[in-house]
Image (cartoon, helix red, strand yellow):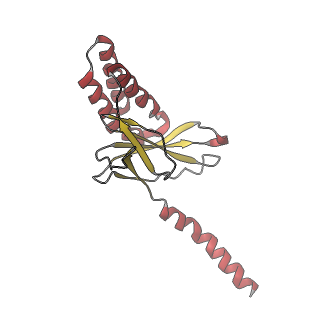
Amino acid sequence: MMSYRIAVLFLACLLAPSVHAASDSFKEGSVLQDGTDTAIAGAVVVVRWQDRSLGRQTGCLHTESAVTDAQGRYRVPAWQTPSEIPGPGAEPVVTVYKQGFQQSRMHGRNRDTQYLKPSVQERKARLDYLLRINHIIECHAAGDSRKNLLPLKQALYQEALEMAVTEEDKKTVDELQASIEATAK
């Protein structure tokens, strides 16, 4: 009887990782407008897996991106931390962008729901915001997956290009364009 229990326990331990891996094969969520909970279609979502070794962020390891559907939902392939990376592994960090909106605070109701609010920023503040997003999403250690940042970088560039008026604004556009070129290499 004891050997039967040990065998069942051993089998359960063997199967547990595969069950866990199957349930984590995608990172899914939704993007809603803050205050109304209206779905936001066409938002660019970037998921970066950040190494959280020793309880602090130490680097971006992998990226994926998607565009939300009509119901504001997104889905990207999950990424598993390679075994050679020590510590608790990487955690997904989500960044969302939609022209005319800015990220809002997380409400805590659902960890996989991201909130945007309509932007009321003036031109200079908006351009600074676009640059901040571009810097936040950088992921130099992500290898080829870094190219998954291109849809967001191109959207940031396009918005900046449309609103650039002054020479200083055009420097922001140039910086965003250089970032696209560096990511595409």
Quarter occupied by residue 104? top left
On the picture, is 165 further left or further right than 66?
left
Q: Position of residue 117 (x, y in %)?
A: 37, 38
Toward the viewer: 28 or 138?
28
On the picture, is 167 further left or further right than 61?
left
Quarter occupied by residue 123? top left
* Residue appearing at x 65%, y 47% in the figure: 87
Eyeballing the image, is 110 above or below 176? Answer: below
Q: Position of residue 82 (x, y in %)?
A: 55, 50
Quadrant in which the N terminus is drawn: bottom right
* Residue appearing at x 30%, y 28% in the figure: 157
Residue at the bottom extreme of this rendering: 1
Eyeballing the image, is 82 above or below 54? Answer: below
Toward the viewer: 111 or 82?
111
Toward the viewer: 65 or 161?
161
Q: Position of residue 49 (x, y in %)?
A: 50, 44
Quadrant in which the C terminus is drawn: top left
On the picture, is 121 further left or further right than 79?
left
Residue at the top extreme of this rendering: 167
Q: Position of residue 6 (x, y in %)?
A: 71, 79
* Residue appearing at x 51%, y 62% in the figure: 21
Eyeballing the image, is 156 above or below 81? Answer: above
